[in-house]
Amino acid sequence: MTQTAAARPPGALRRVTEWTVRRVTEPGFLTATLQTLKSVVAAALAWWFSVAVLASEFPFLAPWVAMLAVHATVYRSLWHGVQTFVASTLGVGLSFVIGNTWGVSVWSFALALLIGLILARIPGIRSEGVAVATTALFVLSSGFTDQEPLLLERIVEVGVGVAFGLAINLLVIPPLQDRQAARYVDSINLRMGELMVEMTDQLADSWDTEQADSWIQETESMSRQVNQAWTYVWFARESERANPRAYLSRRESDRRPARQHENQKAGYGEILSRADEGISHLRHLARTLRESTYAEGAWNERFRTEWVAIVRDAGRAIADPDADVEPVHERLDSLARELSEDHDLPESSWPTYGSLITSMRHIAVIVDDVASSRRAREAN
């Protein structure tokens, strides 16, 4: 017996609602929705222009090309629009050559497709090269005639499609992918900080090899997420090219005080690089803890208490740069000095404690860098 919606547990319904709200409010979702609407508007306007102004008998090329010309960034719309125009023009020319020479048949269709796919591999139009074959097939299958003047009309329609696609993408809230990049980069920092806090909850009492292995696996998962995040960072950088919104943002930053302007050099790439480095040190820390589970003897309680508190505060600072925590560097130095003066500390413990302190020193530097870079970015 299946469970009805009315009988669904409130907790499950709440989680579904929260997930839906979170996805809908993500910058990536909003941008994708806006780009979809812009594709529809560009195609509809291109079709109207072909019918009302050009009086085209087959007004399909302009809206089709216009829809293809609306890309995720203005730069891509410009660059791919040029490629689409060249490829579609080649496709129109190919269809007229084959249609006027051999007519329209299954063999001419196959020949147009073969030549179109070969031309699609030409360097410079390879990204949109398939438009050579598809445009040729569209023209051949749309009531092709041997009227030579139609060749120029088809090329004009292609140009109209590119122009409308580029114009709509450029003039109607041109996409700027910085929020997506910021959200993704911040999610990595949050995940790293939450893992450190989770580790301290267990380290304050006891842990075993299985728990340490799960921490290592989590850091490996975060490293894979970093690789994905670089795609968003590169996308954000590309979205600033040929984008009037990015130009206006830079002009606004130029009006800010010089000191604040210097801080704006910190970007997503820098934060992501530092986060990637921090994940490597965190993985090394987790491996050290795993190896320590095989060691004999109990941990020094003073070291455990102070070191765990430092790790917890560092995790909180990475997850939230505005968190009110005591400086980590000074506490690590103080802990190292206290342990060096403790003559009762077994010598066999120093390799482990020293490794954990060293790993936290590296992470502490990254905590400061991530916090300062993020504040600088949010000030832009």
Image: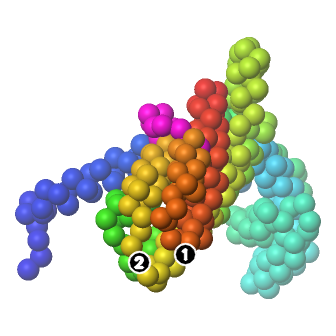
Q: Quadrant of the N terminus?
A: bottom left
Crowding at dot 1, Cα within 10 Å, few <14 / some 14-19 / many 20+, comes out as few
Q: Is residue 188 visible?
A: no
Identified at 52% across, 51% down, the residue is: 338
Give the residues drawn in magenta, as a range: 320-329
Identified at 55% across, 54% down, the residue is: 341
When the figure is inspected, residue 45 is found, relative to residue 124, above or below; the finding is above
Query: Residue 79: which numbered mark, if any?
Result: none
Determine which residue is flagged by label 2. 297
Q: Which colour scheme is used?
A: rainbow
Mark 1: secondary structure? helix
Magenta-drawn stretch contains 278 = no
- Left or right side of 154 for 12: left
* In front of the other: 217 or 8: 217
For the residue marked with disc 1, what is the amino acid? Answer: Ser
* In front of the other: 188 or 356: 356
- Left or right side of 108 for 233: left
Task: Give residue 87's quadrant in the image.
Answer: bottom right
For the residue marked with disc 2, what is the amino acid? Answer: Gly
In the rendering, at what x and y percent does residue 155 appear?
A: 84, 51
* In front of the other: 367 or 343: 343
Majority secondary structure of magenta residues: loop
In the rendering, at what x and y percent does residue 204 appear?
A: 35, 61
The tag earlier along the polypeptide, 2 or 1, is 2
Q: Is residue 349 visible?
A: yes
Determine which residue is flagged by label 1. 348
